[in-house]
């Protein structure tokens, strides 16, 4: 799996030359940013990442509205605020439940937000497996979202 993610990040790097890319992460704990920062010429296109693990950080720093942090509104606020803070024009955000115990939603529930030149979208995915497998699936899907946005 690591080789596949490295290849995906290389492909992102090859298409990102005129973009500023950023990430906002919760359950993935900075792993998306770490992967992107190791991609070729990342200093030219990767603006950085914000890891907002605790709900208070999401609410205060990333302006997530009061209420649950595993939902569309949270993912959209995370991605919008991160685009502004990182001065990025393409951003992906992830917030969800890896488990094993649930706090707000069923383990495997992950919300993704994307910011692409001002357009904000969100989507939910349900991943099966142990917490580490859910985190890996989240990282893969987030990188795939970035890659798809760079294709269009």
Image: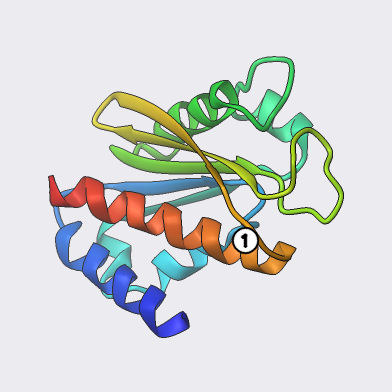
Which residue is at a point 33% across and 69% down the rendered structure image?
Answer: 9
Residue 142 drawn at (x, y percent): 43, 53
Image height check: is 54 above or below 120?
Answer: below
Name the residue that disc number 1 marks. Answer: 135
Are there few (<14), some (14-19), or many (20+) residues within 10 Å of tag 1?
many
Residue 101 drawn at (x, y percent): 87, 49
Image height check: is 61 above or below 39?
Answer: above
Which residue is at a point 68% across and 64% down the rendered structure image?
Answer: 129
Front-lying residue, 57 or 116:
116
Residue 72 drawn at (x, y percent): 54, 25
Which residue is at a point 44% across and 30% down the rendered structure image?
Answer: 122
Front-lying residue, 24 or 46:
24
Q: Residue furthest top?
A: 66
Residue 104 image-quadrant placement: top right
Q: How many numbered callouts?
A: 1
Which residue is at a point 53% across and 61% down the rendered structure image?
Answer: 137
Image height check: is 129 above or below 89?
Answer: below
Residue 120 drawn at (x, y percent): 36, 25
Q: Residue furthest bottom?
A: 3
In the displayed structure image, the side of residue 36 where residue 16 appears, left or right: left
Front-lying residue, 109 or 68:
109
Q: Quadrant of the C terminus?
A: top left
Q: What is the secondary structure assignment of the residue under circle 1? A: helix
In the displayed structure image, the side of residue 98 where residue 75 appears, left or right: left
């Amino acid at each position: 799996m690591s080789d596949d993610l490295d290849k995906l990040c290389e492909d992102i790097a090859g298409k990102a030359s005129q973009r500023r890319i950023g990430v906002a992460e919760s359950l993935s704990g900075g792993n998306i940013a770490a992967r992107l920062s190791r991609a070729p010429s990342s200093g030219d296109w990767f603006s950085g990442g914000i890891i907002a693990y605790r709900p208070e950080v999401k609410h205060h720093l990333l302006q997530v509205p009061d209420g649950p942090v595993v939902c569309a509104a949270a993912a959209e606020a995370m991605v919008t605020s991160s685009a502004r803070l990182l001065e990025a024009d393409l951003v992906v955000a992830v917030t969800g439940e890896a488990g094993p115990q649930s706090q707000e939603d069923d383990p495997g529930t992950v919300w993704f937000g994307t910011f692409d030149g001002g357009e904000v979208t969100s989507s939910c995915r349900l991943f099966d497996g142990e917490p580490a497998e859910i985190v890996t699936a989240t990282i893969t899907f987030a990188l795939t979202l970035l890659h798809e946005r760079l294709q269009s």
